[in-house]
Amino acid sequence: MTNETNNPTLYEVSQMRYDWGLEGEKDTHLTVFLSFIMGGFILMTGLSSGGKNAVVNSAAYCTPGGGQTAEESDWTYPISTSLSKTQLFTDHQNVNSKPVHIHMDVSSIRDKQFLEDMWKAHGEGNDITHSWTEVVGQERISRSQTLHPPNCMVLFLAEDNESVDINDHPEVRNRALLLSIDDSQGLTERVNSRQAQIEAGIIDKRVTDARTKEVRNYVGTIPVDTYTGSGSGGMLNPVAVAIDEQNPLPQHFTEARRDFPRLLDFMNSVALFHYDERLEVPNKVLGEAAQGMVTMLVTPADAWMAMRIFGEKMVLSALNLRDKDFELLGILRNNPDVAMSADELQMEMRARGFNITTPDVRSSLDNMQYKGYVRKNTDSSHVEYSATPFATKAKRYVDLNWSEVVEQTKKTARKAMPDKIAEQYIERHCQGEGLLVTHPFTGETVNLAEQAANELAAKEAEQVEEQNEMMDETNPFGSGGSSDDDSSGGLGDFQ
């Protein structure tokens, strides 16, 4: 049972997903939940019936009015592709009152150009207006209504939907953060075990009903309207310079120009979740650094949690890769002297516990070929693939030095803010208890001043060791990637 004192923690929110019934997907669940606050445009991808709805429903469960479906939340407005343009704009008051818009599974967008136009506009944070003529009796009445961009827009798209390929809509894809669902065999087994336990009545709640209500009520008090859109407040992030100096996101594609601001927005969401413990400074006190009538200050703790929850997904987004793409590329990298067919790669992925079909493998490989990660060899009797030298640039984990982040943040605060406010910020958030963070997935206390805060280094090493062991057990093509040289294709520098 979680600690039920003081303000809620993100660890408690994470535990609530389990009470809803979601197994696994810890980071994806919290990414969606925090994106509800001010996360922009999310594109949920995965196989049909793979759990996209479950993740979003479990995130909405943690918001005011939350229940078993997202539609029950006071925050959400579901938009079906069967809805006409006029129907949607006629309901503008209800639509505009909801901070989260959920576009249900897109089976087809044929004859629905207005949906793509809305995704583009709202993805850029812009309004969209529709004018039409309504006939009432003998009278023709001109109507015009505007839909404002929500704090978060979620779009569902099944990877095995042959009617809609998101790569055919680059202006939509490039505005969205792609979140892939874990459809691995391992998670499927855990989901089935969880369902069996539910049927047997042996599931204990991790958060009491009373505390769940308190969490939802607290979430409802987050001053989102003040700090988003046309609100009177703004956010100031003294940690941003320190994060940028350690270059957390790959810069190989222009999408990184969108991804870094998206990462900063996510830090803002984390700060807003902890608003009751953050400095909110009136503009008359903050002076030239003010971001509106009142400014909330983002802290190193907010940045650490954002990177822990969101960082790996941001890296994959900047690399234009999904989890499955990354795994496929890892197989090719570990076999630098062997070209492999889609069928061979599909069998290897199956051996690693991934539920994936040969057409899915081909689609992934074709996309990676377009991005320059793989090359296609058509000289043989069948098409084969191998990794390119550019594939060595793809690294999944970013290990920041958080002690250096904190020190640089102090310097930035003293440059950006009046002395009194800067010293107050440093005393509260850059030393002592201000550097103690409740881990969002384990509930343990992490001290940003200690080496344990740099946990992604250990995660990377564990991942490399696991992959190497798996390759030794399942690789039928030999140990072609065992050299320590960077050019050898070893998985260590690839992670």
Image (cartoon, rainbow, N blue to C red):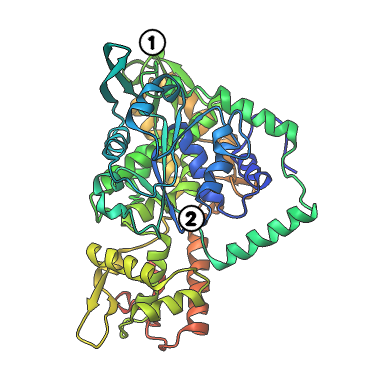
> Any mark on residue 284, and which?
1
Indicate the amino acid at tag 2.
Answer: Ile
Which mark is nearer the camera, 2 or 1? 2
Check disc 1: other Cα within 10 Å, few if <14, some if 14-19, many if 20+: few
Residue 362: where, in percent of width, then height?
A: 33, 70
Side (left or right) of 26 relative to 403 = right
Q: Which mark is residue 181?
A: 2
- Observer able to see residue 80: yes
Q: Is residue 467 above or below residue 112?
A: below
Nearest the camera: 216 or 287?
216
Residue 260 sits in which quadrant?
A: top left
Decide if residue 303 is on the left or right side of residue 483: right
Query: Label 2's element?
Result: loop
Q: Is residue 7 left or right of residue 87?
A: right
Instruction: Identify the amino acid type marked 1.
Output: Lys
Count of marks placed on residues = 2
Locate the N terminus and report the quarter of the image it occupies: top right
Q: Residue at x 38, y 38 (%)?
A: 264
Q: Nearer the viewer, residue 413 or 192?
A: 192
